[in-house]
Each structure stands twice: as C-alpha cells, then as structure tokens.
Amino acid sequence: MNKKIGFTCAYTPVPLIEAAGFSPFRIFPESKAPDQAGHLLHDNLCPHVKKVLDRALADDLPELEGMVFINSCDSMRRLADAWHEAKPDDPIILLDLPSGINSLSLDFLSKEYERLAKTLFKWNNEPFSTEKIKDEIAKWNLLAASVKKIEGIMSRNYFPGIASGLQEIINTAATDSTDKALVMAQNKIEPEKPAKGGQSPVFVFGNLLFDPKVYDLFEEWNMHVTASDFCTTSRFVTQVDTKADDNIFRSMAISYMEQTPCARTMDTTKPGNIAQKIVQRAKESNAKGVIVFTLKFCDPYLARIPMIRQALQKESIPFLMLEGDCTMGSMGQQQTRIEAFTEMLGV
Amino acid sequence: MMYDHFDNAVKGITDKLNQDPEGINARKKYVLELSKLGKKLYSKDENIAWCGVTAPFDLLGSMDVTSCFVEFVGALLSSTQTAGYFFEEAEDSGFATDSCAYHRAVMGAVLKNAMPEPDFIIGTSSPCTAGLAILENFAHQYKKDFFLLNVPQNYTQDAIKYLSSQLEEMVRFVSDHTKRPLSKQKLGIALENFNTSSTLLKEIYDLTKTKPSPVDNNILKDFGTVITLLMGSQEGIDICQAFKDELNHRIKTRRHHDSKEKIRLMWIQNRIQYPFPINEMLEDLGAVIVVDELNDVTWEPMDPDNPFESIAKRMISIPFSMNASERIKHLQDLACAYRIDGAINPCH
Ligand code: SF4
Ligand code: SF4
C-alpha cells in the first residue's frame, strides 16, 4: 500500500502524486471531529477550510507523508498557515495559483507544478521521472474520458443511481487511486438501471458536494441531476491536454486553468464569464433549472452569485440558491425548498 | 453626491488652511489632497482606473491615470454614514450580508450609479480574494476592460520576475486605453518622488517610536495604506514633510507628556471607519495607538533604471501579500520597535 499525500483543492494534479509513488488523499470536510478550528483561524472562514483543520486537529486522518496546499483563495492560504502551526512536523508544500489566465500566469503555474513534482519525488526518495508523470497522466486521461461519457449519459436521460455512482468513482480517484477509479468507471459506462421519466432536470453547481448519498437524496426529491460543476465532481478529473504544449507542466497548467475554472479563476478578457459558462452548461445538459450550493463566507463564489443570477434570469432559467456546509447532515434542511423548486420546474 | 462631498471638503479645508497660513496642519493638508483626488475621480475629464489596494499608483500616476483603490470609497461611505443605503442595494442584488463591508458598500454604490465610471480596472490579488472578486464585478457591471495583477506570496526570483513582467504588460494595457506611451522620464520622476516620500515616511515612523510618542490616536490613522495613493507625486512629498514637521513640532513643544501615555498600542489591519468613539475611549484610558500595522516601509528604494522589478519587489514585500509567519514576524518587529503594551485586532 502506497504512502499517502493529503490535499484539499481540485487544482492539485493527482497524476503528479501517483507518479512520485504516493496515493492521493483528498481531505473532505466531513467528520465528527470537534469544532476546534476557531482556536487557530477566525470563525468567519468557510466551513470547508475549518472542517479540514478540525480533522487535522483531531487526528481524524490516515497517516500522511505530506500535505499539498494550493493558494486558491485566502481561506486556503490560511489553512496552510494553520496546518503548519497545528502540525509543525508535517512536510508541506504550498503552491501559488494565479487568479487570471494568460500566458504569464500559465508559465508561472507550470513552474509551480514542476516544483510540486520535484518535491513529491524527493519526499519519496524517488528519482524524478517525466516518463512516470506522462504514464500517470495517460491513465488519468482515460478516467477523465470515462467520467465525461458517464456525464453525457446523465444529461441525456434519467438513470436512477448514476449520479451517486459517478460520485463514488470520483471520490475513489481523490482518496485512493486512479487505477481503481478507472475500473469502476469503465464498469459504469452502461447504466445499471433502465432510464426513467418523471424527474425534473436540474444542473447543480457550487463549492463542493462530495457525499454520493446526497445525489440519491436528490433523486428521492424528484431531481434528475443532468450535470454538475463542483470542485469535487467532474471538474476534479481534469483531462490533461498533453498536446497543449511541449512542456508537460505547461500542458497541465493550461488544462487545469482553462477547463471549467472554479469561481476563483478569471478570464480577464471576459469579466463575469463564469455566469455565461453556467448558463451554457445548464443548457447543454438539458436542465430546466439550476441550483447552487454555496458555503457561508466563501468570497470567491458568493461575490459571483449576483452575476450568475442575472445571466440565468436573462435566459429565463429558474435558479435556487442554497447555503449550507456541503455535508449530508445539512442537506435535510433543504428538502422542502428543493422539492418546491423541482415541482415548479415540472418534468 | 460624491463629487459635491469632495468639492465641499476641498473648499472647507482650503478656507481653514488659509486662515492659518503659518500652521503645519498636516492632517488637514492630507485630507485636502485626498479630497482633491476624490474630486478628480468624480470629474469627467480624467482617465480613471479603479484598482486593488496594492496597485502601483505611482506608475499609474506617471501615465496620467487617476487611480484609487475601491475600498477608499467604501471607507468614505462608512465614515459619512451613507454605507447603509448602499448595503441594501448590494444585498438586494444578491451580495452576501456577511461579506466585507467595504466591498458591499462600493458595490451598492456601483449599482446605484454613485461611483464614477472608470476607463478600465486594475485588480490585485493582494490583499484579498474578496477585493479581486469585487473588481471583476466592477468590470462586468461597467463593461470595462480588466487587468489583473497577480501578486505572488513568496519573495523568490521567479515571483519577482512574474510580477515585473505583469507590470510591463499592464503598461501596455494602460497605453492602449489612454493612447499615450509610458514616458520613462515621467516614471523616473514618480519613482524619485516615491523614494523621497519613503525616506520621509521612515523618518515619520522613527519619530512616532519615541517614548512618549508624539502621535495621538488619529493623526496617523490608516496612513500607510492611503498615502500610497499620493507617493509618486510632489503632493505626496509635501504631505509626508508636513507630517514630519508636525511630529517634530509636537516633540519640541512637548505637547505629549509621559503622564498622558500610559499604554502604547498597535492597531492590526485597518481602523474602524464608521463613527465610533474608540479613539476617545482609548484616550480616556491613557492608551495611545502608536503604530498601525501598515505604517511601515517594507521596501527598498525604487530603482528608476529597473522600475518594474523594484515595484514588483515592493508589492510582494507588503505584509498582507506574504504568508502568516512573515506577517507575524513583521508584527513582532513592530511590537519591539514601538515598545507596545498591547495590540488591537478588529474584525470588519
Ligand atoms: S473557494 Fe470558497 S469554499 Fe473553497 S476554500 Fe475558498 S472560501 Fe472555502
Ligand atoms: S477588510 Fe478584508 S476583505 Fe475587506 S478589503 Fe480589507 S482585506 Fe479585503
């Protein structure tokens, strides 16, 4: 069994972790660990970051050989600081992730990814190998292609259980191995149950929603999830376009920055473009309505909601905003609102 | 409304200064210059850029762009007690009630057409993700071009190179909008002015370190953050000189006595902007805020022969830009240098 590397952000390239001989372990913000993060960080930080820190403080984690943090937003950056304080002996690397996409930022990020790769190989006393990285990327890309296929099936028809099944595959890639996830994905390409009618097609997006059971609940509440955009769903399995550049790290930088970027990444040539992207994805997936799940105190998302709402309104696409802590536990409170919304959408 | 506010401030302060031509009146002169800047921002015949807090205002000034960080207006709306009206507008359009109050206020002002329309927008990733998100909203709302300066968090050669290349691109972006190329001579003057102001700032801060300190709780409030708007200009030098003179004068005339200064405090981050008598409350207790976190010169002198690299290093050196341990070390250094008894860290 490989030693594990912890990480918290979808901009962390799993192929680099696996190429260095480690297993990935994404730390999801769900645990029964007591609420202690407030001792180290301010209470007005998003529950994602606080729960991850709670897990670290309560030792509610497998043994980790090191942690990869990404400076994706202020909260994540502070999480890295707090982790260092809470676990001073843990090897940590913090990558600087540019906020905008342009040639300079891609150069910079490619150097950051290279720094990450070299650090990981060093942590495992392995000789640095671009070949290994390329092999892992090839596998990862197969997984990404399978995930895309499953998503395509999801958007065309309602197959009960497919959304939670997809989430299980993605979680396996995040917390175990690409190989295992790939086997699961290839078995899932043919839906287990026949297509059904009668559910309202909805596109869901937001920060993170990772518990497969949540998707089963959605189905109970009359929702057909046509597609999703969370940093824990298909956005996590970023296809690396190896032809994008001769330098593999630059190819990774291009792919991770450009594919359905999260709210914290901007296309400065089209300010507010995230709103258009959400509209486009909702339409492409044949959704009749859109639900956003946001976390309290998440500036990157909350500040973009007005633009997104405006853009959806313009297209007459109904929109529901739900705030919670992204866990299964908080979902029960949303049932009435979700059911009312799907009822209003019709089938 | 805002133009009138600044116009009245300029007239009122000018009258007061004319009545006391021999006086030093540093704070009044400073507020006068900021009000003039406010007036320019709201006049229609300037090239206006709304920016992030750490934008290079000296470089923009040398390109004849009137620029300002949006939080400056947020603070003003708060101090004039008009923020509430704009909060409502922002919240109605979907901005979260627990987001940064500066940003909610200015976003409300944008939606109510109370902010001058910029020619373009320059966002900075430091100090905060929230600020950058708001500037993207500005660009979206005004349909204006947006340039983003990503301020890396580590003081490495790669980081400095990355930021200086971005600054060069920013110059091209600005020139494309103003149709004026960068004048090396003007930039050289701005950087010289910046350096002179920096030297004066260091002298000001050295004076404030004395025990008892010549400052009261108001005189250098948020000074380090806001003076950057003026530092590339002659006015910036004059203001810094006035503060230095004022503090020297206070020390000479022993306006501040040991008996008054019982407790020396540091203020972390920026001050409370809405009317709240914290200064007076502290004064009653004999407590003096001798240093604000950002009242410090953390950069080396600007090198006019190497302007972009110098500015990049300066931007990264601001404590907010780096990781927490660097910021804490900076606070510890200030605590020792100013011999403080305690610190206040507000949350707003
Ligand atoms: S993007 Fe939002 S949810 Fe994610 S870590 Fe940052 S603040 Fe938290
Ligand atoms: S108060 Fe915080 S969120 Fe608001 S502008 Fe300042 S650093 Fe940014």
Image: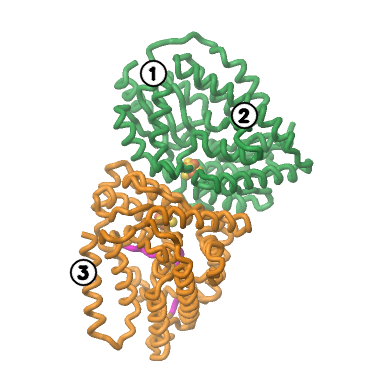
> In the displayed structure, does residue B34 sit left or right of residue B52?
left
Rendered hue of chain B is: orange
Q: Where is residue B177 in the image (x, y as percent from the top left)?
A: 38, 53
Mark 2: give few (<14), some (14-19) or many (20+) Cα within 10 Å.
many
- Which is nearer the eye, A79 or B151? B151
Q: Nearer the viewer, mark 2 or mark 3?
A: 3
Q: Where is residue B343 in the image (x, y as percent from the top left)?
A: 47, 68
Q: Mark 3 points at which residue?
A: B8
Q: Mark 1 points at which residue?
A: A222
Establish whether labels 2 and 3 are both on one chain.
no
Tell me where the magenta segment starts and ends, as one range: B262-274
Task: Tell me if residue A154 can be seen.
Answer: yes
Q: Which of marks 3 and 1 is in front?
A: 3
Q: Where is residue B272 in the image (x, y as percent from the top left)?
A: 36, 63
Main SS, magenta region, reads loop
Q: Name the residue under label 2.
A: A173
